[in-house]
Amino acid sequence: MNQTIKNSQGEALDYTFLPGNEKCRDENWLVILGHGVTGDKDRPVITDTVKALRDVGIDTLAFSFAGNGASEGDFGAATISKEVEDLGAVIDAASHRYTKIAYIGHSMGGAVGLSRVAQDVRINALISIAGMIDTKAFATTEFGDGAVMAAIPQVFAEFIEEMRVEAPSLEITQMFGKPCAKLGGGKPELSFFQDSMAFKLGATRVQEIYASHPEAVPFDPSGKGRPFKDWVQVPEGIDTDWHALAREALGLR
């Protein structure tokens, strides 16, 4: 396979297709492999499984969910439901060539598979490797003790109260255990992390902020070197810009 695979948002999904060993290849079967949170298609648990399947003649397609690895998209926008749609897009691209499709998911990728198989009859077999069962425990392990019920810093709470004068529907929620804010029914646009405000402004605008504010840094709430490309973290000390940047992130100007 050499076609571009895009999800319903038009984001290209990075993938590696590897045909099975020609000596024993079964051309009817394709195994699709999906990774876990903060992972990608090149993690050892995925590549080792691909190699084992290839050796017994099975074609494989390992892919990175949107916002992960080299796939397009924003890691901060990743949800299980969105990744279920990503998996559907991969199956759409492959189903016309194969009569049998299996899916192997690792960690959250396993949860994605369970959700997908409940609605997609094209999946003939499902394997979950260390599949996520207790999401609360996972969040605590992956993102820290405060990931489930993090306290809302006073400075953030007060800032949101000030912003509600212009945006009454602004509500406080959490993202990866970090306090954030969104307009009712929308996605998070503001967050508070390491005594700094973080704003979702889009990749181009973020680069402009870096140029004008040397103190600004990438927003990486997981602490694993996977910053959100559409977000920027603006430290305390240049907080005179916080309100203007919040209005911009919320579309109030």
Image: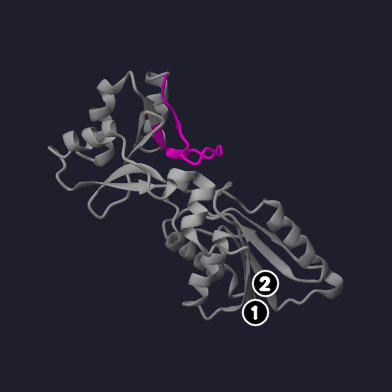
Q: Which mark is residue 5?
A: none
Q: Is residue 1 visible?
A: no
Instruction: Give the camera-side residue of 211 and 103.
Output: 103
The picture places residue 81, in percent across and down from the top left corner, at 43, 63
Q: Quadrant of the N terminus?
A: bottom right
Q: Nearer the viewer, residue 155 or 205?
A: 155
Crowdedness near tag 2: few (<14), some (14–19) or many (≥20) residues, C-alpha within 10 Å: many
User: With respect to residue 129, does 160 lie above or below?
Assistant: above
- Mark 1 and 2 residues: CB-CB less than 8 Å, in contact? yes
Residue sitting at 50 percent across and 45 percent down?
143
Task: Pick out the residue farthest to the left.
Answer: 165
Q: Is residue 224 magenta?
A: yes
Magenta residues span 215-232
> Relative to residue 113, is residue 78 drawn left or right?
left
Q: Amino acid at mark 2?
A: Leu
Give above or below for 204 relative to 86.
above
Q: Nearer the viewer, residue 39 or 133?
A: 133
Residue 152, given in percent of the width and then of the height, sits at: 31, 40
| Residue 17 shown left or right of residue 192 in the figure | right
Residue holding disc 2: 30
In the image, taking residue 5 as reference, residue 29 lies left or right, namely right
Residue at 49% from the left image edge and 44% from the top image edge = 144
Q: Which label's residue is closer to the chain start, 1 or 2?
A: 2
